[in-house]
Every structure is written in C-alpha cells, then in structure tokens.
Amino acid sequence: MSALYHVFILPKEGVTREAVETALNAAPDWVRYYHKCYVIETDQTAEYWFEKLKSLVEPSGHLFICKFDKTHYHGRMEKAFWEWYQAKAPRAND
C-alpha cells in the first residue's frame, strides 16, 4: 500500500534540482510544493529514500524525510498542490 512522505532536501554543492528530481522519479508520483520541499507517493520506507538520496547531500547538505498521516491535514496551498494531494489523500472523517 502506498504512503505519502515529506522530503526536504538541500543537496550538496554541485547537485542540481534536476538531479534530485531524477532520483525522485523512482517513486510512482511526487510533487514539489516549495523550494527544496517535496511530497512523494511510494511503497518504500523513509529509510529506503534516505539511502537513495543520501549521495546527493553528503557531506555538506541536509535531508529530512517523514511519513504523512494522509487522513489528517489542513492548510493553505496553491490549487495545483491541493488537487494532487487530495487525489492521493482523500479526506477521512476526523
């Protein structure tokens, strides 16, 4: 079953956004919603994604990955983000 993960990645010097997004293409789907911030849909774990992305950040960059609870969310974002996110995380009754 797929899950959604938040990924913040500040790559090491010389690594482009295109290189980061090429690595993220291993996920079934993803969206960049802000500079260096992504939400990915995946069947893999946070540990898997850390191992996959760490070469893009070590030794001087930063990487943070955490799982989203797809049933509890609120916020104010661009319409394109909400369309993508709500298709992946239908609202549940709180």
Image (cartoon, grey):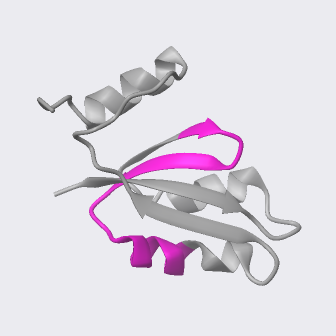
Q: Farthest top residue? A: 79
- The quarter of the rendered structure image containing the C terminus is top left
Location of residue 62 by image quarter: bottom right
Position of 77 compared to 17: left or right? left
Q: Residue furthest left?
A: 93
Q: Indicate whether 50 appears above or below 8.
A: below
60 drawn magenta: no
Q: Residue at x 26, y 43 (%)?
A: 70
Residue under the point 53% across and 23% down? 77
Q: Find the residue positioned furthest to the right.
A: 13
Relative to 35, residue 78 above or below: above
Q: Which residue is rendered at x = 27% and y = 62% of the image?
A: 43
Q: Position of residue 19 (x, y in %)?
A: 69, 59
Residue extent of the magenta highlight: 32-52
User: Which residue is at the front of the view, 58 or 70?
Assistant: 70
Indicate the position of residue 72 as horizontal and vertical percent values. 27, 38
Q: Where is residue 48 in the image (x, y as percent from the top left)?
A: 41, 77
Front residue of 38 and 91: 91
Q: Which residue is drawn at 75% across and 65% down?
A: 11
Q: Would you place residue 5 above or below residue 71 in this image?
A: below
Rendered position, 92 above or below 24: above
Q: Quadrant of the N terminus?
A: bottom left
Measured as percent of width and height from the top left, residue 40 is found at: 43, 50
Q: Nearer the viewer, residue 92 or 80?
A: 92
Number of numbered markers: 0
- Which residue lies most toward the front here? 94
